[in-house]
C-alpha cells in the first residue's frame, strides 16, 4: 500500500461538543479568553502555541509556531528577533494570520490582523522576566541566519555566558522584542460529526463585532 493510500484513510469524527449562537459572547476577544481558559483547564498541551503566518517580499506565505505571551492592548502578544525571517516579513507587510488548534477540545481559532511592534519599555520588562539562558540565547542566536554547525552555535552561547555571567547583566538586544497582533477578523471552529462543523466569524467594525455563522 502506498503512503498516500495510508494517509487518505486517516480520519476521525468530532463528537465532543457543539457551538451555538447562544454560546457566543458579543466581543471576540472575550470569546477568545473564554475558550483559552477552558483549554488551559483541560490541560491542552502547549495551549499557547499558535501558528503565525506571514508573507515575504516575493509574496511567499510562510508559517511557523510561536508562543502567545499575553492578550493585551486589545490584541495577541508574542516576542521574537526582529531580524528573523518573520520579523523581516512583518516589516514589509504587517498583515498576519494566527491559528490556535486544540485537538483535545476539537477546537480551532483563526485570527486575521495586523502586527505592530511593542514599545521598548514593554520589551525590556518582558525580557528581564525570561530565564537566564533564554536571555543568553537571544544574543547567541542570529535567528533565521545560516550557521556552520551546532558546535559554532554552542560556542557562541558559551561566549555570551562568559560575557554576561549573571541574569541581571544580560541587556535587551536591540534587535529583539515583541509584537501585538490586533485582530480584524476572528473565527471560532468547533468540530462536529459528519464534517458538519460549527464555524462562527467575528468581523471587526468601528465599535463592535459583526458575527456570522459560516458553512463548514
Image (tube, grey):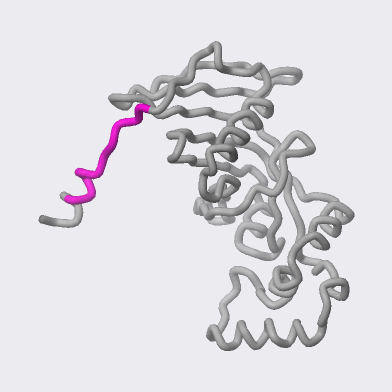
The image shows residue 86, relative to residue 188, as above or below, that is: below
| 92 magenta-colored | no
Q: Locate the C terminus by quadrant.
A: top left
The image shows residue 210, relative to residue 55, as above or below, that is: above
Q: Position of residue 37 (x, y in %)?
A: 62, 34
Majority SS type along the magenta span? loop
Q: Identify which residue is drawn at 45% across, 27% down.
A: 190
Q: Nearer the viewer, residue 92 or 202?
A: 202
Q: Identify which residue is drawn at 66% across, 19% down.
A: 209
| Residue lying furthest left | 1
Q: Identify which residue is drawn at 35% across, 30% down.
A: 14
Q: Is residue 41 left or right of residue 69?
A: left
Q: Is residue 156 left or right of residue 169?
A: left
Q: Nearer the viewer, residue 108 or 111?
A: 108
Q: Is residue 168 left or right of residue 4?
A: right
| 10 magenta-colored | yes
The image shows residue 35, relative to residue 177, as above or below, that is: above
Q: Nearer the viewer, residue 13 or 6?
A: 13
Q: Nearer the viewer, residue 190 or 208?
A: 190
Number of numbered markers: 0
Quadrant in the picture for residue 24: top right
Q: Locate the N terminus by quadrant.
A: bottom left
Range of the magenta residues? 6-15
Q: Is residue 64 left or right of residue 209?
A: left
- Regarding residue 5, the answer to whether it shows in the image is yes
Q: Identify which residue is drawn at 60% across, 35% down.
A: 36
- Regarding residue 52, the answer to whether it shows in the image is no
Amino acid at each position: 500500500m502506498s503512503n498516500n493510500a495510508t494517509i487518505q484513510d486517516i480520519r476521525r469524527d468530532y463528537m465532543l461538543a457543539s457551538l451555538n449562537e447562544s454560546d457566543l459572547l458579543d466581543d471576540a476577544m472575550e470569546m477568545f479568553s473564554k475558550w483559552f481558559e477552558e483549554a488551559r483547564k483541560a490541560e491542552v498541551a502547549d495551549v499557547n502555541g499558535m501558528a503565525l503566518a506571514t508573507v515575504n517580499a516575493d509574496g511567499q506565505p510562510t508559517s511557523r509556531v510561536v508562543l502567545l505571551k499575553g492578550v493585551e492592548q486589545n490584541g495577541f502578544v508574542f516576542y521574537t528577533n526582529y531580524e528573523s525571517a518573520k520579523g523581516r516579513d512583518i516589516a514589509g507587510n504587517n498583515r498576519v494570520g494566527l491559528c490556535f488548534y486544540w485537538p483535545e477540545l476539537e477546537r480551532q481559532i483563526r485570527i486575521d490582523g495586523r502586527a505592530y511592534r511593542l514599545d521598548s519599555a514593554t520589551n525590556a520588562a518582558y525580557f528581564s522576566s525570561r530565564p537566564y539562558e533564554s536571555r543568553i540565547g537571544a544574543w547567541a542566536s542570529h535567528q533565521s541566519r545560516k550557521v556552520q554547525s551546532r558546535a559554532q552555535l554552542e560556542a557562541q552561547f558559551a561566549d555570551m555566558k562568559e560575557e554576561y555571567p549573571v541574569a541581571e547583566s544580560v541587556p535587551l538586544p536591540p534587535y529583539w522584542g515583541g509584537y501585538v497582533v490586533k485582530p480584524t477578523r476572528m473565527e471560532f471552529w468547533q468540530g462536529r460529526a459528519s464534517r458538519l462543523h460549527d464555524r462562527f466569524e467575528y468581523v471587526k467594525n468601528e465599535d463592535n463585532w459583526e458575527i456570522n455563522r459560516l458553512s463548514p
